[in-house]
C-alpha cells in the first residue's frame, strides 16, 4: 500500500546557487489512526496501525528515504525513472538519521517556482512511501492496542504541500489514490464552524457552507412553524369542541330543569284543590284579604296580620305564621267558593218558617196596594 506522511518544513536556508536546503522529519514510530476505507477496510470505521521501531529504523527503510525526488505537491502516480523529470523539483540527501522517534532527512529544493511557493508559505512536507500492512491485532510494548502492523516501509518521494494535517509531527496521510488536491499558497482561507467544529476553507467554500447552513436553518424554522401552526389548529379545534360540548351540556341541564317543572294531571288537580281550599279558608277568616296574584305563604301572612295585627307576623318565621293560620282556620267554616254550584246540587231548602214569611210579605204588599181605597 502507498501512504503519505505530513510534516512541517523548518530550518531552511538558501545556497549561493539559490537552492533551498532544509532538514525534515519524514517518519516516526508508534500508532497512527487511519479511516478504514484508507487502508482497504471500509467495513471498519478506523484502523489503529502500529509502526514498530524495528520497521521504521531498519536499514532498508532508512536507505529508502535517501536520494528520493522532491515534488511540488503529490503526483497522481509513484515517481520513477520514466516520470522523474516531469515531477521532481529537488532531491533528498543521503545523510539519513534517527531523531528520537523520528527519521530525519536532508533535502534540497532546486526549482525556482517551488522555492517561491515555499517562501510564500507553502512550508509543509508529505512523505510518499509504500508499505505492507499485516492485519494482526496486538498490543504495543507501551500497552496500546492496535489493529495492524506496518512492515517493509519504503520511501518513494517527498512532496511539498500547502497544508499538512499534523503540523511539525509526522503523520500517515491519505492513501496514494486519494491524495487531496493542493491549495494555492496565496489563497485566502476562512474559518467556518459546522456543528461546533471549526473548519478552514476557501472564500468560495465558506460562501457555499454558509448558504447551506442558512438553508438548513430556514428549513428548520419553517418546519418549526408548521409544527407550531398544526398544534395551534388542533388546540383551536379542541377549544371549539369543548365550547360546543359546554353548550350541549347547558341545553341538557335546561331540558332537565324544564322536565322537573312539568306537573302531571293528578299533581295539577291536587295543586288546584289545595289552592282553592286555602283561598276559601282565607276568605272565611278575613273576608277582606286580597288573594289574587299572591303566593300561598303571602296569603297566610296577610290573613294572620288582618286578624291579629302586624306585630303578630313581624320577624316571624314562615313555620310560625303557618301554624297561627291553621289555628285561626280551626275556628271558622270556610264559605263555599261557588254558591251557585252548591245551589244547583242541593236545590232550594226551606229553613224554619220561610213559607210563612213569604206569604206574609205577599199579603202585606197586596194590602199596601189597596190602601187608597180605604182612605177614599
Image (cartoon, rainbow, N blue to C red):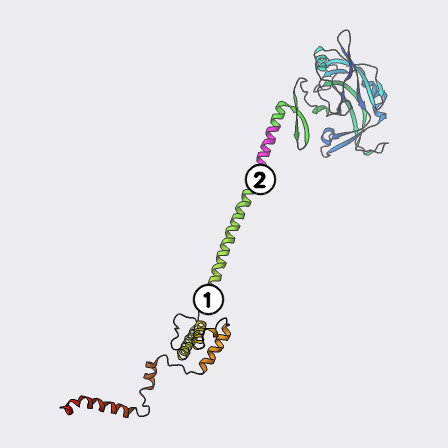
> Which numbered marker is on residue 259?
1
Residue at position x 48%, y 56% in the image: 247
**x, y percentage for residue 268?**
42, 73
| Residue receiving disc 2 | 224
The foreground one among 133 and 122 is 122
> Which numbered marker is on residue 179?
none
Residue furthest left in the image: 376
The foreground one among 140 and 320 is 320
Disc 1 vs disc 2: which is toward the camera?
Answer: 1
Q: Which secondary structure, mark 1?
A: helix
**x, y percentage for residue 64?**
81, 19
Q: In this view, does 192 lie above or below 260?
A: above
**Residue 82: which quarter of the image?**
top right
First in sequence: mark 1 vs mark 2:
2
Q: How crowded is mark 2: few (under 14 residues within 10 Å), some or many (20 or more)?
A: few
Q: Give the main secondary structure of the magenta stretch.
A: helix
Alpha-carbon span between mark 1 and mark 2: 52 Å
Residue furthest top in the image: 16
Q: Which secondary structure, mark 2?
A: helix
Residue at position x 58%, y 40% in the image: 224
Whether label 1 touches label 2, CB < 8 Å = no
Q: Which residues are the magenta region?
A: 209-219
Quarter that holds the N terminus: top right
Is 240 in the magenta? Answer: no
Residue at position x 66%, y 22% in the image: 189
**x, y percentage for residue 297?**
45, 72
Amino acid at each position: 500500500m502507498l501512504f503519505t506522511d505530513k510534516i512541517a518544513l523548518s530550518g531552511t536556508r538558501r545556497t549561493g546557487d539559490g537552492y533551498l536546503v532544509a532538514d525534515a522529519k519524514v517518519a516516526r514510530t508508534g500508532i497512527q489512526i487511519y479511516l478504514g476505507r484508507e487502508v482497504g477496510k471500509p467495513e471498519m470505521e478506523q484502523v489503529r496501525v502500529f509502526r514498530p521501531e524495528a520497521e521504521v529504523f531498519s536499514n532498508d527503510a532508512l536507505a529508502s528515504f535517501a536520494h528520493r525526488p522532491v515534488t511540488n505537491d503529490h503526483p497522481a502516480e509513484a515517481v520513477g525513472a520514466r516520470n522523474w523529470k516531469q515531477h521532481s523539483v529537488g532531491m533528498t540527501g543521503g545523510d539519513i538519521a534517527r531523531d528520537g522517534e523520528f527519521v530525519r532527512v536532508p533535502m534540497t529544493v532546486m526549482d525556482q517556482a517551488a522555492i517561491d511557493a515555499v517562501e510564500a508559505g507553502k512550508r509543509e512536507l508529505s512523505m510518499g512511501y509504500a508499505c505492507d500492512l499485516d492485519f494482526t491485532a496486538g498490543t504495543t510494548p507501551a500497552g496500546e492496542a492496535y489493529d495492524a502492523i506496518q512492515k517493509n516501509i519504503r520511501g518513494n518521494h517527498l512532496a511539498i504541500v500547502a497544508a499538512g494535517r499534523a503540523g511539525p509531527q509526522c503523520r500517515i496521510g491519505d492513501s496514494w489514490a486519494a491524495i487531496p488536491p493542493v491549495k494555492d499558497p496565496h489563497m485566502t482561507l476562512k474559518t467556518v464552524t459546522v456543528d461546533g467544529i471549526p473548519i478552514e476553507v476557501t472564500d468560495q467554500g465558506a460562501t457555499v457552507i454558509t448558504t447551506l447552513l442558512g438553508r438548513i436553518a430556514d428549513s428548520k424554522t419553517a418546519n418549526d412553524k408548521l409544527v407550531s401552526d398544526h398544534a395551534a389548529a388542533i388546540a383551536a379545534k379542541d377549544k371549539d369542541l369543548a365550547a360546543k360540548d359546554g353548550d350541549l351540556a347547558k341545553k341538557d341541564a335546561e331540558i332537565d330543569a324544564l322536565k322537573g317543572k312539568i306537573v302531571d294531571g293528578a299533581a295539577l288537580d291536587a295543586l288546584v284543590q289545595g289552592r282553592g281550599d286555602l283561598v276559601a279558608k282565607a276568605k272565611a277568616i278575613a273576608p277582606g284579604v286580597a288573594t289574587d296574584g299572591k303566593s300561598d305563604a303571602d296569603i297566610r301572612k296577610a290573613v294572620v296580620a288582618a286578624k291579629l295585627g302586624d306585630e303578630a307576623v313581624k320577624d316571624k318565621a314562615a313555620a310560625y305564621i303557618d301554624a297561627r293560620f291553621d289555628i285561626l282556620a280551626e275556628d271558622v267554616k270556610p264559605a263555599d267558593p261557588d254558591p251557585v254550584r252548591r245551589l244547583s246540587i242541593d236545590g232550594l231548602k226551606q229553613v224554619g218558617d220561610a213559607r210563612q214569611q213569604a206569604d206574609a210579605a205577599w199579603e202585606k204588599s197586596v194590602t199596601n196596594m189597596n190602601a187608597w181605597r180605604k182612605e177614599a
